[in-house]
């Protein structure tokens, strides 16, 4: 598999992950499926996972190339000193052009995340980029980084991400070829203190759905 490398330094890699590829080896029914970490190890040797993208999402993801960089970037994500922006297509039309979803999330036995009063604090912000046919294109940023945060939060307000068989109505979502969630920008300070901004346009399978929806 040909991977798109956005940035490489002595300390880290920024990669544009395709939809359908695991970030790291999985357990359960996904054991044995190809994963980005494994593919990068074959090319670069030892690397360290800093954060994750859902298997069916696409876009930018950082891997550390040494233990010191792993500690540094893990700290950045823990303190939320990374700007993460996503392009997301959701079902229906948003009532507000700009809003935030501030709801705690907890993981259920099924693997789904749910809003719960005793969950972990979770904050998602969004702005409406364009109205499509029965759908909305959003730019989303997450302040926290919970599992399935964007998907669970948008589902909780009645706007599931298109192509999301886990949170959306399965019969309706299966007609979409992929999860319509793409990480398009990461902005952070590297180990030298320099501000770095990386961007990646949505891939062809994402854009083909937008075209059908009237983008």
Image (spheres, grey):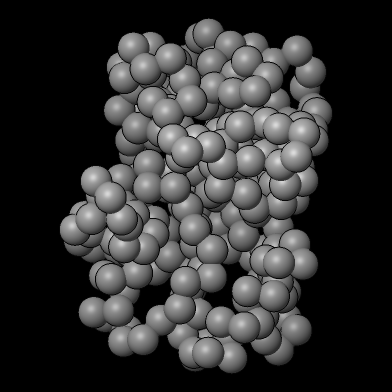
Residue 187 position, x and y percent, is: 67, 63
Residue 130 position, x and y percent, is: 63, 22
Instruction: Determine if residue 122 is in view.
Output: no
Q: Is residue 204 above or below residue 58?
A: above
Q: Is residue 57 left or right of residue 144?
A: left
Q: Quadrant of residue 87?
A: top right
Q: Is residue 9 left or right of residue 194?
A: left
Q: Is residue 152 above or below residue 85?
A: above
Q: What is the residue that sits farthest to the top in this orientation?
A: 134
Q: Quadrant of residue 76?
A: bottom right
Residue 132 position, x and y percent, is: 54, 14
75 and 209: which is toward the camera: 75
Q: For the point 56% across and 41% down, which residue is it? A: 107
Instruction: Determine if residue 137 is in view.
Output: yes
Residue 185 position, x and y percent, is: 60, 54
33 and 39: which is toward the camera: 33
Q: Is residue 206 above or below residue 199?
A: above
């Amino acid at each position: 598999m040909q991977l798109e490398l956005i940035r490489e330094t002595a300390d880290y890699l920024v990669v544009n992950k395709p939809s359908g590829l695991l970030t790291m080896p999985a357990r359960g029914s996904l054991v044995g499926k190809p994963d980005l970490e494994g593919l990068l190890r074959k090319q670069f040797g030892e690397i360290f996972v800093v954060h994750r993208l859902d298997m069916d999402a696409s876009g930018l993801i950082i891997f550390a190339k040494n233990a010191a960089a792993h500690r540094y970037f893990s700290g950045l994500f823990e303190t939320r000193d990374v700007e993460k922006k996503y392009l997301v297509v959701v079902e229906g039309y948003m009532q507000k052009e700009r809003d935030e979803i501030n709801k705690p999330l907890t993981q259920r036995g099924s693997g789904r995340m749910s809003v719960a009063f005793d969950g972990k604090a979770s904050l998602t912000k969004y702005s409406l980029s364009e109205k499509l046919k029965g759908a909305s294109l959003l730019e989303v940023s997450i302040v926290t980084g919970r599992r399935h945060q964007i998907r669970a939060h948008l589902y909780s307000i009645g706007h599931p991400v298109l192509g999301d068989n886990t949170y959306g109505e399965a019969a309706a979502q299966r007609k979409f070829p992929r999860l319509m969630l793409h990480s398009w920008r990461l902005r952070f300070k590297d180990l030298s203190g320099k501000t770095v901004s990386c961007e990646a346009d949505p891939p062809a399978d994402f854009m083909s759905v937008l075209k059908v929806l009237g983008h």
